[in-house]
Amino acid sequence: MKQSTINVLRQIRDAKRPAVLATRLADGRESIIDPEQPDGLGPAALDAVRTDRSGPVEIDGEEWFLQVFNPPLRMLIIGGVHIAQHLNTMARQAGYDVTVIDPRAAFASTERFPGTTLNHQWPDAAMAELTPDHRTAVVALTHDPKIDDPAIHAALESNAFYVGALGSRRTHAGRRERLQAADVDPALLDRIHAPIGLDIGARSPAEIALSIVAEVTQVLRRGGAR
């Protein structure tokens, strides 16, 4: 790989944007592809980015190798509650860079979340600073509308690939009413995964965390909204 190619890929990485390095196998010609641009490699590059999978493809009779350079996966956990402790561990093991957001320092403490990035701002300020992108999952767990609602509102207006919130169907119905009253586009509300997590009959905090990681993975790899 040429030094100039490496420098461009570093710039793209620093901007937290996806890119695909396409190498023509016949002669080694390299090209950096923006997967959202409609050129000859666009659809194949976009599919590679979505599946996070590098590999050979045939385009117009030519063999290419597409190497995916995606931004890091991130998970923003709203609320340093008990479930969040288990979720933090599981998400990090699954490859996510986790940030726990909670203005209550007693909940989001280094003792409860060792080695994890903590943010003690109110969620609206934290989300504006962290700018969730298409590689970010946002999980609201506090059950406190003062904390969860601003985070969900910001997440729905971002490119976050997953937005989930803890609570029953009745709790979520009230949440939808509050968010609509706060001028959230009703069409965006369908992006919220609530009750959060895959329905595996989870009861304990660890099981609920497992169901959340499973659902986030499903949405990441297969797409789709609730």
Image: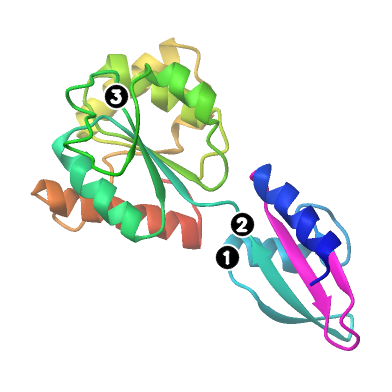
Q: In this picture, which residue range is highlighted in magenta?
A: 16-31
Q: Earlier in the sequence, mark 1 or mark 3?
A: 1
Q: Position of residue 161 (x, y in %)?
A: 51, 45
Residue 162 visible, this angle: no
Q: Residue flagged by tag 3: what amino acid is it?
A: Asp
Residue at 49% across, 30% down: 156
Lateral position of residue 133 relative to residue 207, left or right: right
Placement of the N terminus among the 4 image quadrants: bottom right
Residue at 53% across, 52% down: 72
Residue 140: quarter of image: top left
- Tell whether label 1 touches label 2 (CB within 8 Å): yes
Distance CA(mark 1)–CA(mark 3): 31 Å
Q: Residue flagged by tag 1: what amino acid is it?
A: Asp
Depth check, front residue: 210 or 74: 74
Residue 174 visible, this angle: yes
Label 1: element kind:
loop
Query: Any mark on residue 52, and which?
Result: 1
Q: Position of residue 122 (x, y in %)?
A: 37, 16
Q: Earlier in the sequence, mark 3 or mark 2?
A: 2
List the residue tagged with mark 2: 70
Display colour scheme: rainbow
Residue at 45% across, 11% down: 182
List the residue tagged with mark 3: 102
- Tell whether label 3 touches label 1 (CB within 8 Å): no
Distance CA(mark 2)–CA(mark 1): 7 Å
